[in-house]
Amino acid sequence: MRLILLGAPGAGKGTVAKMLTAIDGSVQISTGDILRAAVKAGTELGKKAEAAMKAGELVSDDLIMGIMEERLKEDDCKAGFLLDGFPRTIPQAEALKGLLAKMGIELQGAVNLNVPREVILDRLTTRRTCVDCGAIYNVKSNPPKEEGKCDACGGAVVQRDDETEEAISKRLDVFNEQTAPLVGFYQNEGMLVDIEATSSDVVVDAIKKHVGIA
Ligand code: AMP
């Protein structure tokens, strides 16, 4: 599959991407995961991105496009890719369009995961993430078997720095201002697939149908 996953923070992009990778070997490319790994490793990229991330603001388009140009050229992308959290702005979407045209790659769609704001807020404040493998848990609906420890890899399961109430509210404002316009952008491109994302199973089924796997 070669898809963009659009949707607010907490809409379920990461969960759905992980489910889809298991279907056909496509890779999940999460700019948020790449940036968090860079921050953890203390690289130059991490140092440049850290402050904006902590505040719930966006990292610069140039930095993100640099990451994505390199990532999309890697061999594993030949099996397909699911873009999770990218593009996040109109300039990123335009740059991606140029990059893919240059590489001769055609996308199969931009899938918009529609989730009501109250659901998003509840999900983000109760979400927990493994610092090592990125597995996602929820303290209410899907806690790890042992508190604070990842079922998959044993890593620490924590609340992300940008999932305090203040940072979440900022991230949702940034989403509404800068990322929500991408729905119109991809509609104009004739690529939008709009899904009422009531559960990840519903979304995965709709996507399978869209790409002709179901
Ligand atoms: P995420 O895990 O996708 O919610 O991303 C976490 C944070 O990383 C965001 O709040 C931004 O600060 C930064 N980030 C991730 N992807 C992008 C992107 N495509 N453009 C700009 N900033 C990004």
Image (spheres, rainbow, N blue to C red):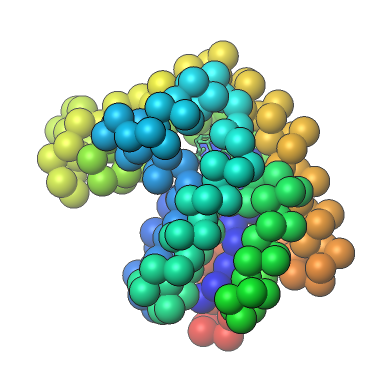
Q: Position of residue 135 (x, y in %)?
A: 31, 45
Q: Is residue 134 above or below residue 177?
A: below
Q: Is residue 115 left or right of residue 79?
A: right
- Is residue 163 at all visible to an observer of this figure? no
* Residue nearest the viewer, comparing 13 with 209: 13
Above or below for 26 versus 149: below
Question: In the drawing, does residue 160 fall left or right of residue 120?
Answer: left
Q: Which of the pair 99/190 is nearer the observer?
A: 99
Is 98 left or right of 164, judged from the image as shown? right
The residue shown at (77%, 61%) is 186
Residue 70: image quadrant is: bottom left
* Residue 157 can be seen in this image: yes
- Where residue 103 sits, quadrant-wise, is bottom right
In front: 127, or 132?
132
Q: Residue at x 52, y 50 (%)?
A: 66
- Residue 168 is situated, as x and y percent measured from the top left of the image, at 56, 23
User: How many numbered callouts?
Assistant: 0
